[in-house]
Amino acid sequence: MTTLRAFTCDDLFRFNNINLDPLTETYGIPFYLQYLAHWPEYFIVAEAPGGELMGYSAAALIFCMFTVMGKAEGSVAREEWHGHVTALSVAPEFRRLGLAAKLMELLEEISEKKGGFFVDLFVRVSNQVAVNMYKQLGYSVYRTVLEYYSASSGEPDEDAYDMRKALSRDTEKKSVIPLPHPVRPEDIE
């Protein structure tokens, strides 16, 4: 049976199988520790019966093994207070089991409890598997962010979709009305 639990510092040394996926953004240990210190409730790991990590999420990040990592950010006054999915990744051997959907659901529940208006995430335009999964979970493309992802080995930078899902506090669904034009990374608040 899969166990969902809080991410711990020790897990930083156990999730390489998740982070090595080419579509997973990886960060330095200080970045993960910052999320763990500031938004521990948004940092969740899925553990298989044998103890191996299946994924993680941090409102903002989900990997599988299975983890999700995220945070709360924005302005309440401008109706922009929201949960943000930093990353979501599932280890290849644990995909198509509904783990990513479960982690996203947990992140959305936390964001609801914190009074968020919406949950957002960034995904590579080329990652149609992820884009389609998020759409199935109720997310829509809010805007395109030009050259959001830095490329390696001489390739051009890649655009991202900023995808959003309105929460119950956004009764008029203002947060998910698509912008008519793309933006640049420096234009994002």
Image (cartoon, rainbow, N blue to C red):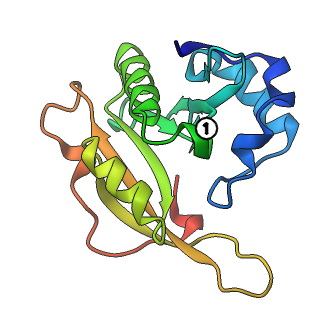
Please give left or right for residue 148 compared with residue 131 in the image: right
Q: Dot 1: few (<14), some (14–19), or many (≥20) neighbours within 10 Å?
A: many
- Examine the rendered structure and indicate whether residue 95 appears above or below residue 7: below
For label 1, the SS is: loop
Task: Tell me which corner region of the image, top left, top right, bottom left or bottom right, holds residue 151.
Answer: bottom right
The location of residue 66, given as percent across then percent down, is: 59, 31
**Residue drawn 46% across the image and 47% down it:** 121
Q: Which residue is mark 1?
A: 63
- Examine the rendered structure and indicate whether residue 83 appears above or below residue 96: above
* Front-most of residues 110 and 175: 110
Task: Tell me which corner region of the image, top left, top right, bottom left or bottom right, holds residue 96.
Answer: top left
* Front-most of residues 27 and 132: 132
The location of residue 102, given as percent across then percent down, is: 41, 26
Residue type beneath disc 1: Phe
Q: Is residue 74 visible in this depiction of the protein?
A: no
- Examine the rendered structure and indicate whether residue 189 appears above or below residue 1: below
* Front-most of residues 62 and 70: 62
**Residue drawn 46% across the image and 30% down it:** 99
**Residue drawn 63% across the image and 21% down it:** 39
Q: Residue furthest left?
A: 172
**Residue drawn 75% across the image and 19% down it:** 37
The location of residue 16, given as percent across then percent down, is: 80, 40
